Image (tube, rainbow, N blue to C red):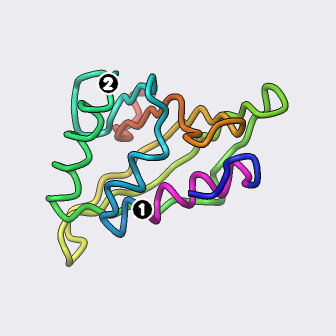
Amino acid sequence: MKNSRDQSPETIVDHWADHFNNGNLERLLDMYQEEATLLPTFSPNLLSTPKQIEEYFVRTIEHQASVIIDAGTTIKKKFSENMYVMTGFYIFYFGNNHKREFKSRFTFLIDLSTEKPIQHHHSSQISESLF
């Protein structure tokens, strides 16, 4: 992966989606810091080790999952020179025919000062509004 310092937070999110959609597990996992946490869309557990994160993505990719990011909803917040939060919406699809879709929201905590920029990733399905 390119040095994160040479990339924008938007590019990091785009690369994440590309690696996920191409089933490129190695490149996807290379984006997560060793101490990264993942609160995934399709598991009730907080994942806090590289092995847990890998096992989750192996299972998800095996189910022919793909994702489309709704770039029009993405919000970027800068916290310091290299620290950003990217949050917005995406849709997960399963199977080649895209019959099953899951509208979801995401938050990435991105540190551009490291080779592995993702410190935290939270993803959850969007449920019907109660109010």
Residue farthest along the right direction in this orientation: 81
Query: Which residue is painted at 41% across and 25% down in the image?
Result: 37
Q: How far across and how far down the image is residue 82, in percent?
A: 77, 34
Query: Which residue is painted at 36% across and 66% down in the image?
Result: 21
Q: Is residue 89 left or right of residue 64?
A: right
Image quadrant where residue 110 sits: top right
- Look at the numbered disc 1 and give the secondary structure of its residue: helix
Disc 1 residue type (three-letter): His
Q: Is residue 16 left or right of residue 72?
A: left
Does 7 appear above or below 109? below
Name the main secondary structure of what is drawn in magenta.
helix
Does 91 appear above or below 78? below
Disc 2 residue type (three-letter): Thr
Image quadrant where residue 115 sits: top right
- Look at the numbered disc 2 and give the secondary structure of its residue: loop
- How crowded pointer 2 is (Cα within 10 Å; few <14, some 14-19, many 20+) is rated as some
Q: Earlier in the sequence, mark 2 or mark 1?
A: 1
User: Which dot marks residue 107?
Assistant: none
Residue where numbered disc 1 is placed = 19
Viewport quadrant of the N terminus? bottom right
Does 90 appear above or below 37? below
Residue where numbered disc 2 is placed = 49
Mark pair 2, 1: CA separation: 20 Å
Tell me if label 2 and label 1 are in contact, CB under 8 Å: no
| Residue closest to the eye, 30 or 92 | 30
Q: Which residues are magenta?
A: 7-18
Residue farthest along the bottom direction in this orientation: 97
Q: Is residue 130 left or right of residue 65?
A: right
> Could you tell me how many numbered marks the image carries?
2
